[in-house]
């Protein structure tokens, strides 16, 4: 891992953070893959019970976020994004571990996530104990209409 982690803050986010969340997504997600959500989608999700947002700051600025939700004894990591300048500095790992910790405090037994096939984030998820449990063919739709598979991963939290 290159660089040094200088995580200045890991905090709970809310609807007031959605402008910055949208900016981070614009920086983090390549539009050709169709992974980013709209602000309206994020706002709609945040209004639901059991949903939480974590914001990471690095070197004095917002560097990434994670959005997750619980339902009964399960949770799902909905989005995790870091600005390119913050990559390989521990931000994504810190966000993922914060989601895992919060899920445990909420009594979650299993945490799920979905990731585009070929996404480099798979290395992080596997390092944090996630295992591939499924696949959705042609799930993501890119900007030019291309289809990309989604892989589902899960991790036991008991």
Image: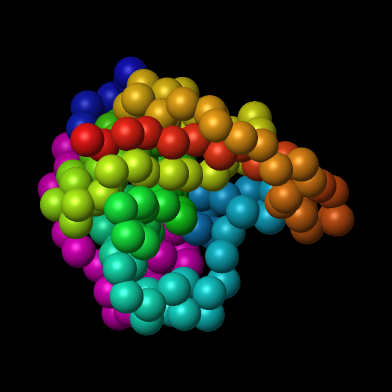
**Residue 150 can be seen, yes or no:** yes
Q: Say which residue appears at 40% left-offset and 41% top-offset.
A: 85
- Comparing 94 with 100, the one in front is 100
Numbered-mark total: 0
Q: Is residue 95 above or below residue 155?
A: below
Res 134 quadrant in image: top right
Q: Could you tell me which quadrant the C terminus lies in?
A: top left
Q: Say which residue appears at 65% left-offset and 41% top-offset.
A: 150
Q: In the image, is residue 16 part of the stretch drawn in magenta?
A: yes
Q: Residue furthest right?
A: 145
Q: Say which residue appears at 52% left-offset and 80% top-offset.
A: 40
**Residue 83 can be seen, yes or no:** no
Report the magenta residues as a range: 6-24
Q: In the image, is residue 15 part of the stretch drawn in magenta?
A: yes
Q: Estimate the x, y position of residue 97 in percent, counting from the top left.
A: 24, 39
- Residue 56 lies left or right of residue 33; in this view the side is left
Q: Estimate the x, y position of residue 12 in percent, counting from the top left.
A: 20, 63
Q: Is residue 58 above or below residue 93?
A: below
Q: Estimate the x, y position of residue 100 in percent, counting from the top left.
A: 25, 43
Q: Say which residue appears at 46% left-offset and 80% top-offset.
A: 44
């Amino acid at each position: 891992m290159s660089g040094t982690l200088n995580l200045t803050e890991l905090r709970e986010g809310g609807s007031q953070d959605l402008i910055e969340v949208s900016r981070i997504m614009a920086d983090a997600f390549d539009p050709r893959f169709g992974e980013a959500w709209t602000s309206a989608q994020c706002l709609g999700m945040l209004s639901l019970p059991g949903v939480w947002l974590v914001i990471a700051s690095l070197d004095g600025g917002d560097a990434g976020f994670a959005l997750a939700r619980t339902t009964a004894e399960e949770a799902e990591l909905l989005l995790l994004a870091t600005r390119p300048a913050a990559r390989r500095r521990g931000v994504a790992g810190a966000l993922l571990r914060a989601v895992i910790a919060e899920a445990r405090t909420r009594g979650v037994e299993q945490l799920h996530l979905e990731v585009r096939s070929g996404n480099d984030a798979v290395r992080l998820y596997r390092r944090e104990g996630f295992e591939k449990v499924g696949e959705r063919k042609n799930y993501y739709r890119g900007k030019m209409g291309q289809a990309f598979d989604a892989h589902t991963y899960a991790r036991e939290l008991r």
